[in-house]
Image (cartoon, rainbow, N blue to C red):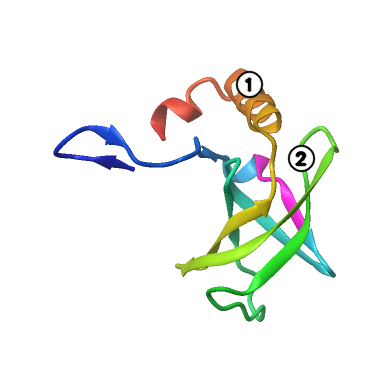
C-alpha cells in the first residue's frame, strides 16, 4: 500500500498476485483453497463456501505450487473480505519461493504483473 501524501511503501513484504488460471492450492485438512496472493508474511485465499473462519483463528496447511513443490504454512486470520481470507503467517513462504513464483509468472505471463 502506498501512502499518497508521501509515496512511501508501507507493506513489509512484496505481495505476488496470481492469474486465476495459475493459482496454487492450499490444502488445509480435507479442504482445498485457491491462493490469490502470496508474500513472505501472508497469503490471501478464496474462502470456500461453508468454511467458517473468524478473525484471530489459527490456520495451517500446505500450499502446492505449479512445480508440484509444497510449503507448509500456518498463521492467524487477519481479515475476511469479499469471499477471501487474509492470513498473517507465523510460519510461511520463503523469500526464495516468492522470487521463483514471480520469475515463473513473468516468463509465462509477461504483461500480467505490469497490470496489477
* Residue 95, x across and y down, in percent: 65, 31
Relative to 72, is 67 above or below? above
Image quarter of residue 105: top right
For label 2, the crowd category at 10 Å Cα-Cα, with few meaning under 14, some 14 to 19 and many 20 or more, is some
Q: Residues within 10 Å of mark 1 (few under 14, many from 20)?
A: few
Name the outermost residue toward the front. Answer: 90
Looking at this view, is 56 or 49 the one in front?
56
Q: Residue 55 magenta-drawn?
A: no
Q: What residue lies at 41% left-to-right and 35% top-to-bottom?
A: 116
On the rendered image, what quadrant is the N terminus found in? top left
Residue at figure coordinates x 14%, y 39% from the top left = 5
Looking at the picture, how far across and down is residue 101, in whole percent?
Answer: 66, 30
User: Could you tell me which residue is drawn at 45 percent across and 67 percent down?
Assistant: 81
Write down the region rendered in magenta: 22-26
User: In the rendered image of this protein, does residue 30 appear above or below residue 1?
Assistant: below
Residue 94: percent from the left, percent from the top?
A: 69, 36
Q: Along the line of sight, which residue is nearer the eye, 28 or 60?
A: 60
Magenta stretch: residue 23 in it?
yes
What secondary structure is found at the residue carrying circle 2?
A: loop
Residue 65: numbered disc = 2
Distance in Å between CA atoms under marks 2 and 1: 13 Å
Name the element at disc 1: helix
Q: Residue at x 22, y 32 (%)?
A: 7
Which label belongs to residue 45?
none
Q: Disc 1 designates what residue? A: 103
Contact (Cβ within 8 Å) of mark 2 with mark 1: no
Looking at the image, residue 8 sits to the left or right of residue 46; the answer is: left
Amino acid at each position: 500500500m502506498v501512502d499518497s501524501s508521501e509515496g512511501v511503501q508501507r507493506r513489509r513484504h512484496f505481495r505476488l498476485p496470481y492469474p486465476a488460471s495459475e493459482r496454487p492450492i492450499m490444502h488445509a485438512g480435507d479442504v482445498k483453497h485457491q491462493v490469490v496472493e502470496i508474500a513472505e508474511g501472508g497469503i490471501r485465499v478464496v474462502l470456500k463456501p461453508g468454511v467458517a473462519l473468524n478473525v484471530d483463528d489459527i490456520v495451517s496447511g500446505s500450499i502446492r505450487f505449479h512445480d508440484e513443490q509444497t510449503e507448509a504454512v500456518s498463521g492467524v486470520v487477519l481479515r475476511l473480505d469479499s469471499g477471501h481470507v487474509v492470513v498473517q503467517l507465523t510460519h510461511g513462504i520463503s523469500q526464495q519461493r516468492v522470487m521463483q513464483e514471480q520469475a515463473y509468472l513473468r516468463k509465462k505471463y509477461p504483461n500480467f504483473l505490469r497490470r496489477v
